[in-house]
């Protein structure tokens, strides 16, 4: 595993990750917001990846209408033209009592090595190149446990109740809210007409498709634990019996049982299993 740092002074995040984007077979971006200025810096690389049938996902925040409608329209069109690209959004927290979505995670997987960036950079020209930022960039073999843990974080972002896939109508209404709030900022948020517009967006979200958690999308720890879960009811100790088998995957982990408990909780939060009582779990057959 190799760890380096970018600050956009001695090394930009763009320069650090661009080669990994070009070689990736799976690209995942989870950022608080994205702007067209950031998209154009990696546009050609993304299109080249799609031509090679790579899988690309964006998990974008809409908090305080910071993500630009222009880039949502571009990603929506790309997703309609190519099913290998998906764009999901996180509900705006400025109107309803939900958590603010604030990660800056880049995950680039070429099926042998994974390049991960975690830090302060959103997917904008400033975040990738011009601002003073602080990011850690990790290059690791796909089998290393750190890669499993990062995938686990990403999946927990993706599979939760406030994530949805915007359509053209939603983006048009979002653009109206964006333009109004960008022009008048906090003052516009207090107006009744703006509140009604945001309410309309939230109503629309209820009917929009959500990412459905399925076993094949799991990776690392989540995958190996899920594959051992019996259908129907089981207890945590039933999974402890696979401790030695799990250790073969991650021999550096000295607390396998604690890891099993953690992963069961993650699978519950992703909707793959239920937790009806203490130390009691249920796995249902999935279609």
Image (cartoon, grey):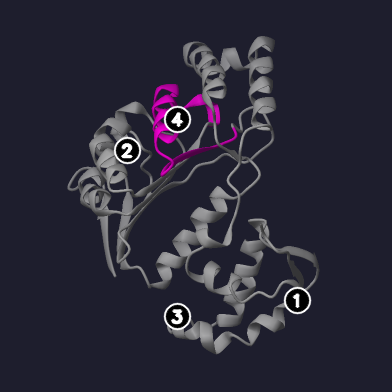
Residue 156 spot, x, y in % from top left: 56, 54
* Residue for badge 3: 249
Mark with earlier residue (3, 2): 2
Binning the other alpha carbons within 10 Å of mark 2 as few (below 14), some (14 to 19) or many (20 upward) gives: many
Q: Is residue 130 left or right of residue 228?
A: left
Q: Nearer the viewer, mark 3 or mark 2?
A: 3
Q: Element type at marker 2?
A: helix
* Residue for badge 1: 234
Q: Nearer the viewer, mark 2 or mark 1?
A: 1
Q: Is residue 77 magenta?
A: yes
Mark with earlier residue (1, 4): 4
Q: Element type at marker 3?
A: helix
Mark with earlier residue (1, 3): 1
* Residue for badge 4: 76
* Residue for badge 2: 127
Mark with earlier residue (2, 4): 4
Q: Residue at x 23, y 36 (%)?
A: 44
């Amino acid at each position: 595993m190799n760890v380096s740092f970018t600050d956009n002074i001695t090394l930009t995040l763009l320069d650090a990750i661009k080669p990994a984007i070009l070689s990736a077979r799976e690209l995942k971006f989870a950022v608080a917001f994205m702007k067209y200025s950031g998209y154009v810096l990696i546009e050609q690389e993304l299109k080249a990846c799609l031509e090679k049938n790579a899988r690309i996902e964006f998990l974008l925040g809409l908090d305080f209408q910071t993500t630009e409608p222009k880039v949502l329209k571009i990603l929506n069109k790309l997703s309609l033209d190519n099913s290998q690209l998906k764009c999901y959004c996180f509900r705006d927290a400025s109107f309803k009592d939900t958590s603010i979505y604030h990660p800056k995670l880049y995950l680039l997987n070429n099926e042998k090595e994974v390049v991960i960036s975690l830090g302060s950079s959103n997917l904008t020209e400033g975040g990738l190149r011009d601002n003073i930022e602080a990011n850690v960039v990790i290059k690791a073999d796909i089998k290393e446990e750190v890669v499993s843990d990062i995938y686990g974080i990403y999946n927990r972002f993706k599979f939760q109740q406030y994530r949805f896939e915007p359509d053209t109508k939603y983006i048009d209404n979002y653009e109206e809210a964006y333009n109004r709030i960008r022009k008048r900022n906090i003052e516009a948020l207090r107006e009744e007409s703006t509140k009604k517009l945001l309410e309309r967006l939230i109503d629309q979200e209820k009917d929009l498709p959500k990412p459905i958690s399925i076993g094949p999308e799991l990776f690392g720890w989540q995958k190996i634990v899920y594959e051992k879960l019996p259908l129907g009811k089981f207890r945590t100790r039933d999974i402890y019996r696979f401790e030695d088998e799990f250790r073969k995957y991650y021999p550096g982990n000295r607390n396998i049982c604690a890891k099993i408990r953690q992963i069961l909780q993650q699978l519950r939060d992703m909707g793959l299993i239920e937790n009806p009582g203490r130390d009691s779990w249920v796995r249902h057959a999935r279609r």
